[in-house]
Amino acid sequence: MTTLAKSGHIEIPQGKIAYRVYQASESSNKTPVIFIHGGPGFPLYGMENDFQNITSERPVIFYDQLGCGASTIKTGSESDDSFPPYPPGYCG
């Protein structure tokens, strides 16, 4: 049975990246897969069910891009100007 093993946020200068790690107990010692999704603008909430066959074989790390889903992005003077923020409301 695949379960949510860990979730949280990683803080970077541009904001906070939300992540979730799913794995079956017997897959915990295998090399994890990092799910890199296209976008921008599409949170991963709910997509984990589409990847049950992978998460039963090895740990899978999902994350929301900055400004999408459960991730946040800093704007204005707090943000690194070399990292352009998405337009307001772009990530639904």
Image (cartoon, rainbow, N blue to C red):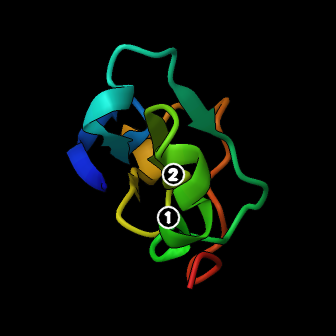
Image height of 76 relative to 68, above or below: above
Asked if 23 appears above or below 28 in the picture, the reply is: below
Marks 1 and 2, the one that precedes in the sequence: 1
- Which of the 4 image quadrants contains residue 40? bottom right
Report if residue 68 is visible in the image.
Answer: no
Q: Tell me which amino acid carries mark 2.
A: Leu
In x, y percent, where is residue 22? 36, 46
Q: How far is the residue under mark 1 from the one under mark 2?
A: 18 Å
Q: Residue at x 61, y 69 (%)?
A: 50
Residue 77: % across, % down: 41, 42
Q: Secondary structure at mark 1?
A: helix
Please tell me in which quadrant of the rendered image residue 51 appears. bottom right
**Numbered circles on residues, count:** 2
User: Which residue occupies the foreground of this view, 19 or 89?
Assistant: 19
Q: Nearer the viewer, residue 52 or 80?
A: 52
Question: Badge 1 is on which residue?
Answer: 48
Residue 80 at x, y percent in the picture = 52, 31
Residue sitting at x 44%, y 54%: 75
Q: Which residue is mark 2?
A: 66
Nearest to the observer: residue 57 or residue 71: 57
Q: Which element is circle 2 on?
A: loop
Identified by mark 1, the residue type is Glu
Q: The N terminus appears in which quarter of the rendering?
A: bottom left
* Residue 4 seen in render: yes
